Structures are given as C-alpha cells and as structure tokens.
Amino acid sequence: MLAFTRRTVTALTASLILAVASVSTPALAQQKPVIKVSSLTLPVFAPLLWNVIKARGFDAKHGFELEMHPYPSISAYYAAFATGETDALVGGPTVFQKLAQEGVPVRIIGSAITLADLVIFAKAPAIKSLADLKGKQIAADMGSGQFQVVKIYASAKGIDLGKDIAVVNANFAVARAQLEAGRVDAAMVIEPLASIILKQNPDWKIIFNGAEGWKEVTGSDGWELVPAMRADAIQRVPNGPKMLLAALADAADVIHKETAAADKIANETLKLPPGILTAAVDSKRLQAVVKPASDPAVRKSLLDMMERAVKAGFLEKMPNAGIIATP
C-alpha cells in the first residue's frame, strides 16, 4: 500500500496546481478573441471611438480585445483593411462600396457618425448658401466621400459643382488655409477642424451642413462614418459585429453623456486642444449614433447613399446586398 507523507502530498498538490494552470490559462486567454482595427494618427474623430473603447475597457466588458493599428494616412488606413492586416474600421459608406467592387470582403455592420460634421465655410457675408457660390471658387477634397455628398446635394439643387462653382482640390487643412488666405470663396471641412476654425475665426459662416443638406434632398439621414468588418474576420469571430457594436455604443454614450471625459481622452490621444470635442458635441455637429446595419432605417439610408453615388457617376454599380451585414 502506498504511504503518503506530508512531503509527497505537498508535492502532489503542487503538481496538480501546475497541471490545472497549464490547461486553464490558455483556455481563459482564448475566451477573448482579438479584433484588429485600423486607426489614424491624424487629429480627426475616426479614431476617437476606438480610443474611448480602450480607455474605458469596453472591449473587455463585451468579451473581446481591441487591438488598434495606427496609420499616418487615410490611404494606408483603408489599405490595411483591404489586405486583411486589420479586421475592422470605421469609414465612409461609399468608400466601402468601392472596396467591395474591388473584391474586398467588406461587411458594413452598423452606423456611427452622421453627416452633421461635414460643413462648408465662407467668409463673405453675402455668401449664405451654395447657390451664392455660383461663379466663385470652393476648396474641397475631390477624392473624399464628403465631396460626393456635397456634389449630390448641389446636383439636386440644379448646381453643377465643377462648372457652376469652380473646385480647387485640397484636403481639409489646406482648404481651410486657402479660405483664410482669400484664394477661394469657401472651404469644405469636417470636425474637429470645423470647431477649431470657429474658435479662431468666429466671424466665418457655415453655409452648408451635411446632415441638413442630405435630409433636405433625400428625406433620410446620411452617414459619414460607419463600422465595417471583413467577412473572414466575422467567420473567425461570429459574435464580432455584435460585440464591436456594443462597445461602440458605449463609446458613443461617453461622447454625449460624459463629454468632459471624452474631451480629455481626445486631448490625450488625438492631441486636440481642450474644449474642441465639447464644442463639436454641444453644437450637434458631432453626432455618434450606433445602430446595427440591419436596422431598416439604417439599411435603407446606406443603400440610398450608394445608389445616389452610382447615379452621380462616382461608382460603376451597386454592390451585392451582402455588403450590409445581417444577424
């Protein structure tokens, strides 16, 4: 009969603890899947949602680990998603439409930021609308989804943007500089630059707001940024869209209900001046609305944006219906 001394019992207990630990530790680690997202090092609001999620631990709360991959340019930001280097990102609906046409397995999983943060500034008091820009010049990024929105709106109003109004191609920061120098009569920008401009130039006037303009001509809301995941990432993490949307919704709540805390995160991570995020939220130009893409109103508005982009000649055709993720 085997005799157990105190030493052998202690040794056996230690061995059992190590054995359990060696089995359970990897199992616990595997319980939280990693979702890699494209982020930006630029002072824009696209990465703010991810920054709030990480700062508040909303990824862990909803059962996953958010792994941010920062990129210094918009092109690299989307390229990482297109090649599969990242699993998800927030971006423009029509940009995702273009990626889908190029064979990227993109699935839009919800809504995020409305078009309210897209604005056009003018300095001259006589310029009060786009119609007043006829025969004048506007600085705008012609390759952006925001420009598509403005052009579609202008077309609905009988204005040919490019003919009736001359367009000087410029990114948002350069567009602001062009207007400041008096080289153009108006500039198209987005938040947070819009709030920075108003703080420094309170006499400048907003003559166009993306959300208001889009609703005027379409009767529905439009989206500047929406979250998307790759189909292969969803296959790997089936609950990924649900978990990601839950974390994004929590981040949106912080932005709107704990704005001072969100402002601090924006200052620390995006290097935005204190108060800029608060100004954008208080003015209602920054509106984070997170709903699943399967929501009938969200789905309808997304497809409407894509259809109008095709009719305007920005894209060749409508994407497969599968671009809108369904539960």
Image: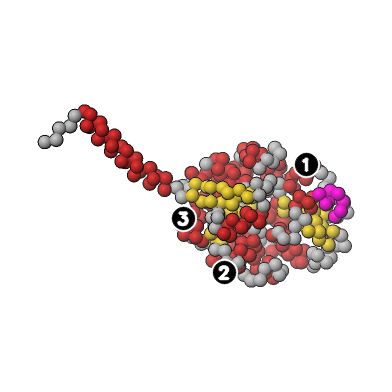
Left or right, 235 with respect to 315, comes to left
Q: Name the residue under label 3.
A: 237
> Which amino acid type is shown beneath numbered disc 1?
Lys
The residue at the point 62 percent across, 70 percent down is 318
Query: Where the N terminus falls, by quadrant?
Result: top left
Q: Quadrant of residue 313?
A: bottom right
Which residue is located at x 45 percent, y 47 percent? 32
Residue 181 belongs to magenta span: yes
- Residue indicated by mark 2: 320
Q: Do the residues labelled 3 and 2 touch (CB within 8 Å)?
A: no
State the separation of the CA atoms marked 2 and 1: 44 Å
Cα distance, mark 3 to mark 1? Answer: 44 Å
Which residue is more in the foreground, 176 or 214? 176
Q: What element carries label 1?
A: helix
Comparing 67 with 295, the one in front is 67
What amino acid is at disc 2?
Asn
Residue 278 in sight here:
no
Specify the segment rendered in magenta.
177-185
For marks 2 and 1, the one nearer the N-term is 1
